Amino acid sequence: MSILAAVDATSEHDSVVEIGYDLASAYETELSVLHVVSQEAFESRKAAVERVSDVQGYSKPQRADAAANVANKVVVETLENSDRETISTVGRVGEPVPSILDVAADIDAEYIVIGGRKRSPTGKALFGSTTQSVLLEADRPVVTVMSDTGE
């Protein structure tokens, strides 16, 4: 059993990691922190790296490692003085919802912890929501940590 905390690259991930860490500590299990980079964002970053270096292309494991580095940065910033022996970081490149659900299944996560934003009814109708999709599609409990920022 483990806990999966899915984070993005915004500054609103602190609470998600903290809640995930609290759950993992309470259940005496591992916390896995996941960051998913969209293919479009990854291609943009890759192009920038290729412009300033001789690196041409990334293997699939290298792409996942690059995404995991973001998750690792979040852990270091959020849990400065915590025991990190039971924390792992995971990275994926692709669509967030299927990636989150796949990793949760792969690690047999007891809970998925994910962030959300308070949204107006219009915002909900016009824009897709990763959080909403995970809530609807997950086959395990999802803990949603809401931020105060709205759309």
Image (spheres, rainbow, N blue to C red):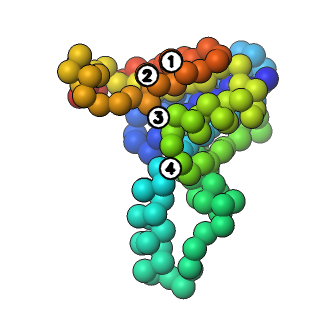
Tell me where residue 25 appears, x and y as whole percent.
71, 21
Q: Nearer the viewer, residue 141 or 23?
A: 141
* Residue 82 seen in the current view: no
* Residue 30 seen in the current view: yes
First along the sequence among labels 4 and 2: 4
What residue is shown at x 71% (from left), y 15% (from top)?
26
Q: Which residue is mark 1?
A: 136
Element on which disc 1 rests: helix
First along the sequence among labels 3 and 4: 3
Question: Mark 3 and mark 4: span between their CA atoms?
Answer: 15 Å
Q: Which quadrant of the structure image shows residue 33? A: top right
Between circles 3 and 1, the one closer to the viewer is 1
Element on which disc 3 rests: helix
Question: Mark 3 and mark 1: span between their CA atoms?
Answer: 21 Å
Question: Mark 1 and mark 4: span between their CA atoms?
Answer: 21 Å
Element on which disc 2 rests: helix
User: Could you tell me the amino acid type at mark 4?
Assistant: Val
Q: Which residue is mark 3?
A: 13
Q: Which quadrant of the structure image shows residue 100? A: top right
